[in-house]
């Protein structure tokens, strides 16, 4: 069985972070593992508090996995401060996994900050250069590039600039602003365009985490980058179409919809 290691924060409400990543890996038939870098007290409506894990424990979690288990791909999510970023970057440079998918998480779905503003420079200098695929949304891409993104051409311009920072490829997610859900992938040579119809739902908690871990899962399974992104986007689209009305805010996506459907475990109202 192929394996994916998620290095991210923990979401106690289960819709994002490590919890979303493990669910996504399981839905793809790969073995999910985790390194928790922050414990986030959050729900579908708000982030209440964050407690970062000591860097020594982050490093030892990474060591514990790599010394024992072959890691086919790594997904990196929430890294809230500079110390965390530096230790994660150093450890991944040490172990050199074949694929590193990085979701530069800056804000929760409800707008609460998850990355300290003074850590943006460290993200650019130490984290982006180790990425096989970087998956910023439009606001994150604007912060990284200082380019205002209003059109698909702007997305392409920003993608080229981000690749110039050292990552192998970048997927800019256009779900925030531009028409239908249009994402632009740039692999350093070619652009790929992925478009799905925008889904009218507020229940999108954890979609960024889910997409990046789905890409990592597909890379672990042996797909090339463009195919991995396409498969992941299809998976996330289905998960959003059948999102769950859980909680008072932005509910979670349905990570196991296809699995439950095949197993006959859905109620008639969920089909």
Image (spheres, grey):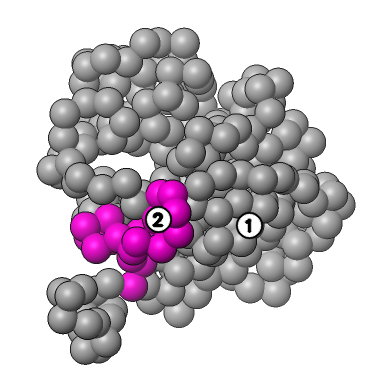
Query: Residue placed at 20% from the left, 73% from the top?
Result: 270
Q: Is residue 76 above or below residue 128?
A: below
* Residue at which label 2 appears: 251
Report the front residue among 211 and 75: 211
Q: Is residue 106 above or below residue 240?
A: above
Label 2: element kind = loop
Whole-percent x, y for residue 13 in the image: 55, 61
The residue range painted magenta reads: 238-256
Label 1: element kind = strand
Q: Is residue 250 magenta?
A: yes
Whole-percent x, y for residue 107 in the image: 53, 35
Query: Residue placed at 82% from the left, 47% from the top?
Result: 55
* Residue at which label 1 appears: 10
Give the class, few, some or many, for how many residues have Cα within 10 Å of label 1's Cα (few <14, many ≥20).
Answer: many
Whole-percent x, y for residue 207 in the image: 39, 50
Which residue is most to the top? 147
Tell me, yes or no, if residue 215 can be seen here: no
Circle nearer the N terminus (1, 2): 1
Name which quarter of the figure residue 120 lies in. Answer: top right
């Amino acid at each position: 069985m192929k394996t994916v290691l998620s290095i991210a924060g923990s979401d106690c409400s289960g819709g994002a972070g490590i919890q979303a990543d493990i669910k996504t890996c399981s839905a793809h038939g790969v073995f999910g593992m985790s390194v928790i870098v922050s414990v986030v007290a959050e729900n579908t409506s708000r982030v209440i508090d964050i407690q970062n894990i000591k860097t020594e424990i982050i490093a030892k979690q990474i060591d514990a996995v790599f010394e024992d288990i072959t890691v086919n791909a790594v997904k990196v999510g929430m890294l809230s401060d500079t110390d965390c970023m530096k230790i994660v970057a150093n450890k991944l440079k040490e172990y050199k996994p074949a694929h590193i998918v990085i979701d530069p998480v800056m804000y929760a779905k409800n707008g609460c900050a998850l990355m300290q503003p003074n850590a943006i420079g460290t993200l650019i200098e130490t984290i982006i250069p180790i990425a096989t695929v970087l998956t910023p949304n439009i606001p994150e891409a604007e912060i990284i590039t200082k380019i205002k993104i209003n059109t698909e051409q702007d997305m392409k311009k920003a993608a080229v600039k981000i690749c110039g920072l050292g990552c192998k490829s970048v997927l800019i997610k256009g779900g925030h602003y531009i028409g239908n859900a249009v994402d632009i992938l740039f692999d350093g040579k070619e652009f790929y365009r992925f478009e799905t119809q925008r889904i009218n739902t507020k229940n999108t908690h954890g979609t960024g985490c889910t997409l990046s871990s789905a890409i990592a899962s597909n890379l672990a399974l042996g797909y090339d980058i463009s195919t991995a992104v396409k498969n992941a986007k299809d998976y996330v689209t289905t998960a959003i179409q059948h999102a769950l009305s859980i909680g008072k805010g932005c509910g979670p996506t349905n990570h196991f919809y296809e699995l439950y459907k095949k197993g006959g475990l859905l109620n008639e109202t969920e089909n």
